[in-house]
Image (cartoon, helix red, strand yellow):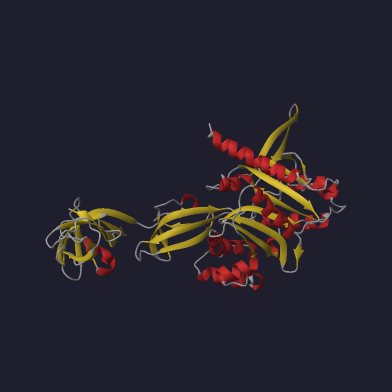
């Protein structure tokens, strides 16, 4: 049995999280965990389940890896600001901080840009008792400061040259993967010194599902003492752009020989009518609470 | 020598990195929320003794290093090389001053220590954590000092200089921590 005082502390913190959102008028939602169309994200693997919907008729469904698309369907139906605290499931996770199942807090604020959302997350951290200094630094400045690399204006070939110089592998199909290697090698160790750090404006190649503005994607990550805790976007609003992003991930999947799944047509159909401008974030609650408890 | 994939990385595993044998001190798996998994690894270069950090794409592999650590007896030095013997095989090994490094400060003939062999050749030697050495030179002790509040340099029989309490005199045997070069007590 787990230590009861730990359970108590966790219970109180989760209640504080709910209070924080409830007092601002957000609605807590629950969305389906079992999906017909799993994520197309090339580096996130879904866990498949065999589901019997009738005698002798077995179908495969997938445990969600994030409630993102289901929550955006609610937003497209006019839900407004929403939050969810749920378990998410991912296959092929290993390492001391990665698990096949973890707790995620995901929330969306209508009309917020990423800077307003980052400020809101800081208010949440304060409410949870984290009063440390906050550092905000753009992805590009982090690379200039810690790696002396102008990351937004360095080509794939030039980055490979830099990696070779540091005796690191250059065996990558896409520049974004090499950017990530260099980020983990040069920048992340420096972030360990910072109690709360936001990295924002990622290179456009790492846009994921965030809006792109010139060379950068309006995306941020939060690190607590060098550990990645949250990932947020200024959300894409229309289905055409989502379709482009999904297709790009599927292209990557096919190049890497990974399985390609059908897209969530229900989602794409709903977002033909664009959702309101909003920003959303996924926060790893287990990692966050681990820093507090 | 076999290759080791990042999934087999663990502390103490000996690998060839940039041509030198290295030992893994820390292996951290980093899997970004959006992105593939990486291993951020801290190594100790077994030849230079330096620590280095490298990041690998998970799934990369490195060549293993044929490294053995053997307890050996220190026999003698001829001025150019230091000679050791494996007490099991009676095989003798000669280490040069580079491989000896600071260990020369703590070795007395007949002492046991751990010699690291790479492909059968000695590359370094580590003394025991505590060794007993004799004071060959130090200023006379001050009368009445028993608590060891102050301190004074003392030259030991290996030539190394260690800070000792004032009451320690020439000819006394002292115990020294070889990791910190500090006096531990009278032996």
- Give the x, y percent position of residue A43: 64, 52
Query: Between residues B123 and A232, which one lies in front from this camera angle?
Result: A232
Residue placed furthest toward the right:
A273
**Image quarter of residue B99:** bottom left
Query: Between residues A23 and A33, which one lies in front from this camera angle?
Result: A23
- Give the x, y percent position of residue A278: 79, 55
Is A3 rendered above or below residue A207? above
Residue B14 at least partly seen: yes
Residue placed furthest toward the front:
B144
Q: Is residue A191 left or right of residue B187?
A: right
**Image quarter of residue B49:** bottom left
Residue placed furthest toward the top:
A55
Give the quadrant of the C terminus of chain A: top right
Is B83 rendered above or below residue A104? below
- Give the x, y percent position of residue B31: 58, 53
Residue at 47 percent across and 54 percent down: it is B27
How many labels, in total? Answer: 0
**Image quarter of residue A67:** top right
Q: Is residue A27 left or right of residue B96?
A: right
Residue A174 at least partly seen: no
Q: Is residue A23 left or right of residue A104?
A: right
Is B107 rendered above or below residue A81? below
Query: Between residues B141 and B121, which one lies in front from this camera angle?
Result: B141
- Give the x, y percent position of residue A56: 74, 28
Q: Is residue A27 left or right of residue A196?
A: right
Is B51 rendered above or below residue A97? below
């Amino acid at each position: 049995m787990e230590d009861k005082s730990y359970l108590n502390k966790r219970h109180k913190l989760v209640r504080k999280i709910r209070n924080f959102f409830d007092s601002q008028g957000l609605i807590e939602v629950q969305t389906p965990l079992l999906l017909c169309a799993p994520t197309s994200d090339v580096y996130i693997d879904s866990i498949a389940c065999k589901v019997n919907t009738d005698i002798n008729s077995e179908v495969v469904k997938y445990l969600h890896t994030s409630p993102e698309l289901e929550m955006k369907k609610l937003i497209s139906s006019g839900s407004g600001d929403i939050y969810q605290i749920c378990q998410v499931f991912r296959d092929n996770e290993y390492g001391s901080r990665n698990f096949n199942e973890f707790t995620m807090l995901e929330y969306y604020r209508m009309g917020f840009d990423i800077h307003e959302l980052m400020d809101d997350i800081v208010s949440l951290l304060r409410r949870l008792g984290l009063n440390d200094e906050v550092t905000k630094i753009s992805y590009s400045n982090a690379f200039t400061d810690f790696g002396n690399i102008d990351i937004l204006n360095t080509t794939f070939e030039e980055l490979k040259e830099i990696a070779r110089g540091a005796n690191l592998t250059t065996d990558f199909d896409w520049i974004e993967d090499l950017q990530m290697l260099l980020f983990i090698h040069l920048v992340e160790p420096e972030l360990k010194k910072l109690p709360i750090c936001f990295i924002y404006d990622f290179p456009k190649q790492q846009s994921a599902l965030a809006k792109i503005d010139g060379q950068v994607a309006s995306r941020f990550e939060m690190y607590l003492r060098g550990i990645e805790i949250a990932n947020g976007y200024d959300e894409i609003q229309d289905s055409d752009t989502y379709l482009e992003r999904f297709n790009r991930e599927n292209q990557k999947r096919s190049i890497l020989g990974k399985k390609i799944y059908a897209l969530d047509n229900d989602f794409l159909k709903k977002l033909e009518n664009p959702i309101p401008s909003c920003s959303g974030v996924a926060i790893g609650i287990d990692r966050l609470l681990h820093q507090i408890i | 020598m076999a290759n080791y994939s990042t999934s087999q990385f663990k502390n103490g595993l000996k690998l060839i990195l940039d041509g030198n044998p290295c030992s893994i001190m820390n292996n951290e798996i980093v899997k970004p929320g959006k992105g593939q998994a990486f291993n951020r690894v801290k190594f100790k270069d077994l030849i230079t003794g330096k620590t280095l950090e490298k990041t690998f794409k998970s799934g990369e592999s490195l060549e293993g290093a044929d490294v053995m650590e053997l307890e050996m007896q220190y026999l003698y030095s001829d001025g150019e090389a230091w000679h050791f013997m494996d007490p099991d095989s009676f095989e003798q090994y000669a280490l040069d001053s580079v491989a000896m490094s600071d260990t020369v400060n703590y070795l007395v003939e007949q002492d046991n220590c751990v010699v690291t062999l790479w492909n059968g050749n000695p590359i370094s030697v580590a003394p025991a954590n505590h060794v007993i050495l004799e004071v060959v030179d130090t200023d006379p002790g001050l009368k009445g000092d028993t608590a060891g509040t102050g301190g004074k340099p003392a030259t030991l029989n290996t030539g190394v200089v260690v800070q000792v309490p004032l009451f320690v005199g020439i000819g006394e045997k002292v115990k020294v921590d070889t990791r910190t070069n500090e006096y531990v007590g009278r032996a």
